[in-house]
Image (cartoon, helix red, strand yellow):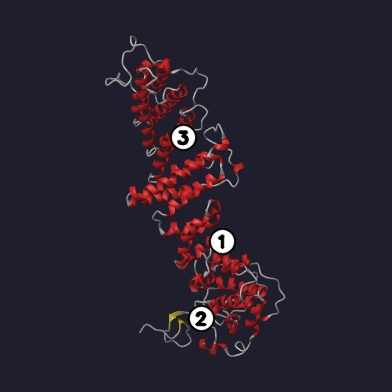
Amino acid sequence: MPSVVVDKKKRQRIATDYIMPKKKRTSEPGSSKPSQAPEPTPKSIIEMEQQISSSTEYYNNLVHLIEYLNSSDSQIALLAATSLFRSFARMLAAGLLKKPKSSNAALAQETVTLWLRDRYKDFKSKLISLLNNENAENALTSLTILVRLVKEESSRLAPTNGEYYFAKSLFRRILHALLNQSDDELLLEFVEKYVNKYDDLRYYFLHFSGLLANDAQTNLSDAQKTKFTANLLSALYAIDNFPTEDLHLNEFWVELPNKSKQPVTKLSAQKAAFQDSWLAVLRLPLTVDQYKYILQIMHNKIVPYMSKPQTLMDFLTDSYDAGGSTSLLALNALFSLIQKYNLDYPNFYTKLYVLLDRNVMHVKYRSRFFRLLDLFLSSTHLPALLVASFIKRLSRLAISAPPSAIVIVIPFIYNLLKRHNSCNVLLQRTDWIDRDIAKESDHNDPFVANESDPMKSRALDSSLWELATLQSHYHPNVATLAKIMSEPFHKPAYNIEDFMDHSYNTMLDAEFTKNIRNPPAVEFVLPKTLFESGNEGEQAYLEGWDLC
């Protein structure tokens, strides 16, 4: 790709250098009858660029180069784009594109400047339209030039010399075009190359993405909103290395004349922009998958970088009250607000107790839930009745749970009993275990399984007969693990992480790879027929079945 670097060695021209005397001018810039465009070739494009830089007489070449951007030849379009960039960059450096002050400017100079500004607008509009070009190289080149123009405008078009200025209008147009594309490939390229690297571009990206998201709620159709939301979420997910201190803000795309007074240099402003962007996204229509993924990452990728995480309280409490897997995913972020930001949620443990149903043992977020549950029940100041209710409900659920879930529940209960000694009465009460459990009916157990309030479940009046039942489980690993409840509690607490990732596959793999010292003796007679044939002495595979 041709270089898009401005030649800084060239002499900077003042505005009057570009105004040709009327005697030598053959056509006025912007004339309705421009000279005929030459055949677009790499050589002719370079010659036209050189002519533009040499004299105002050839300013109409800008019109021809802009037309070449429509060329079906990718090479011609790229050369035209880079030539136009270099030409307009020189004019920006010379101050030719600054808005003229009519009271102090000569009429001819003002006319030329206004005409050049119009052509510059045409160039930018064409580049923005090329962001949707099917040719990925053309689209990427257009994006590169547009971002370079943001830098050039910000450096050259400041209202006052020495004052900080950022080309907000152009940057917003670029972002609007990227967020409304059919896919997010170019947008992610933009985030990776520029937003993640430069602190000022990240700030303005977050600032304008929030504004555009607010506008999208009223200005876009449902289909456009869906596309816009998906693209914006992809971009926000891709933002990494978010600063945590003001000292980390030291990479800027646009040079700062006075760093201490600019919002882009302040962490508080960066966090405020981040917060506004995410709050605007949460007001957009989200799919179920998007909603769940946001909840899944909220505690570590969203909440820590917001200026006021308390603004998420309503969203998280509504999510926690929704039930099902949505409540499980909202747990982490909600607990962060309770723990660090004094969120008042008085029925937290009651709702957590309700979430413990048989579905928890089967969802893919099971490991995540048990990690959080272990955290929530880690305090030794919790009421014994509350902890006993959780222990009893987990024991009851373990009876119908898959083996991969049971191997989590048993060590989990063991740790709770070690941590809360007052709950050991559940093991010491053996009158339930000594009976023939197979003949016991559920109504003899004082535990109220259907009670939603853990303080009213009467769990401390019951026992852990369910764990005694698991000692006869069909899976040998489960049965062996359950027997720890019948032994003295001299072992240290288990590391729950060692049991979190078990599944049917891992348990089967462990069985298949197990070294068997003494292979069991197997007696097996290969059947000769599938069904009984009636012949005496012939053993069938399906005894008792025939084809009649």
Query: Of all residues shown, which one is farthest toward the front?
Result: 103
Q: Kindly identify which numbered label has been placed on residue 51.
A: none
Please tell me how crowded label 2 is: few (under 14), some (14-19), or many (20+) other residues with Cα within 10 Å: some
The answer to which of marks 1 and 3 sits earlier in the sequence is: 3
Identity, as a three-letter code, of the amino acid under mark 2 = Ala
- Residue located beneath label 1 in the image: 342
Vertical comparison of 276 with 399: above or below? above
The reply to whether residue 7 is visible in this rendering is: yes
Q: Amino acid at mark 3?
A: Val
Measure how far apart labels 1 and 3 are at the Cα level. Answer: 43 Å
Q: On screen, 29 above or below 193? A: above
Gap between marks 1 and 2, in whole Å?
A: 32 Å
Disc 3 element? helix
Numbered badge on residue 449: 2
Residue 201, x across and y down, in percent:
50, 39
Question: Between disc 1 and disc 2, whose residue precedes?
Answer: 1
Q: Which residue is mark 3?
A: 147
Q: Is residue 3 visible?
A: no
Give yes or no for contact between labels 1 and 2 (Cβ–Cβ under 8 Å).
no
Q: Earlier in the sequence, mark 2 or mark 3?
A: 3
Q: Answer above or below: position of 254 versus 226.
A: above
